[in-house]
Image (cartoon, helix red, strand yellow):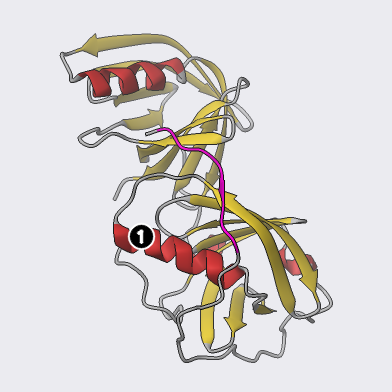
Amino acid sequence: MTTTRWLLPAAVTIMAITGCGGQGGDAARPSDSSGLWDRTFVSADDAGRQLVPGTRVRLTFTPGTVAAEAGCNHLTGRLAVEGDRLVVTDVGGTMMACSPERMNQDTWLTTFLQQRPRWELDADTLVLTTGDDRLRLVDVRSAEPDRPLAGTRWSLESLVEGESASSVPRGADVRLTFGDGRVEGSTTCTDFDGAASVGQGTISVSRLTTRARKCAAELEALDEKVRGRLSGEISFRIRGDKLALTRADGRGMELRAAP
């Protein structure tokens, strides 16, 4: 299912959860937001909100932008820091089909971020509060150390084409494993292996051999898209248990380390 960009208006009602930001002697001063930039935070076990099982809130801060996930869509918004407040506007994102619970969690997070939450950063712990609502997060490098590229079984979550993303069809099981100068895996319809030379942030894939089997039309279309993204030089980035593969033409894949 191909996704497009969308915008959500600021909501006026949020769910109330009792809690407050913790105090710490090394907490960042509200006027100094430099500790936020180029960092990703994920919800802690005591996040302050009961999340949908199997999901985590993930926030990535870069100057002027916040990227967010809550278990379904990828969200982005404009970000300004005004004292002890995060000012998030123009929130948009993908529109992938998810369960109602996950979609509702996306809506909650969008609403929460647009309510000018107070922020407090203490080393690797970030606490956001607005009214009685509270979200506690920790730096992803503490909570989820980066997985190694080699030896990890990576499972496809979405295909990327420029600013658009598409979800994986039901019944698909797309996986990749890198190691010893090779890549191997399956698109559900095709098993494959080939040479994979890993450089500084890049992977060069060549001499891909395939063993195909009959599949449903939707899975065959996915097979073609995946294999089209696994040739030549590909940029890669690992953050925690997530792997992003991106070609120079903007086509890419987002994968997660399998349990």
Say above or below: 49 vs 72. below
User: Residue 227, position in %: x, y?
Assistant: 39, 17
Residue 78 % position (x, y): 71, 56
- 10 Å crowding of disc 1: few (<14), some (14-19), many (20+): some
- Residue sitting at the far right: 31
Residue 182 in the image: state x and y as whole percent. Answer: 40, 21
Examine the rendering and report whether any part of residue 250 can be seen.
yes
Is label 1 in a helix, a strand or a loop? Answer: helix
Q: Which amino acid does label 1 sit on?
A: Arg
Q: In this view, does 111 lie above or below 148?
A: below
Residue 150 visible in the displayed image: no
- Would residue 101 be counted in the magenta stretch? no
Quick check: is 7 in the magenta stretch?
yes
The secondary structure making up most of the magenta span is loop
**Boundaries of the magenta span:** 2-9
- Give me the residue at 41% from left, 65% from top: 105
The residue under the point 55% across, 42% down is 5
Judged left or right of residue 239, residue 64 is right
Relative to 45, say whether 216 is above or below.
above
Q: Where is residue 36 in the image (x, y as percent from the top left)?
A: 71, 66
The residue lying at 79 percent from left, 66 percent from top is 34
Q: Mark 1 points at which residue?
A: 102
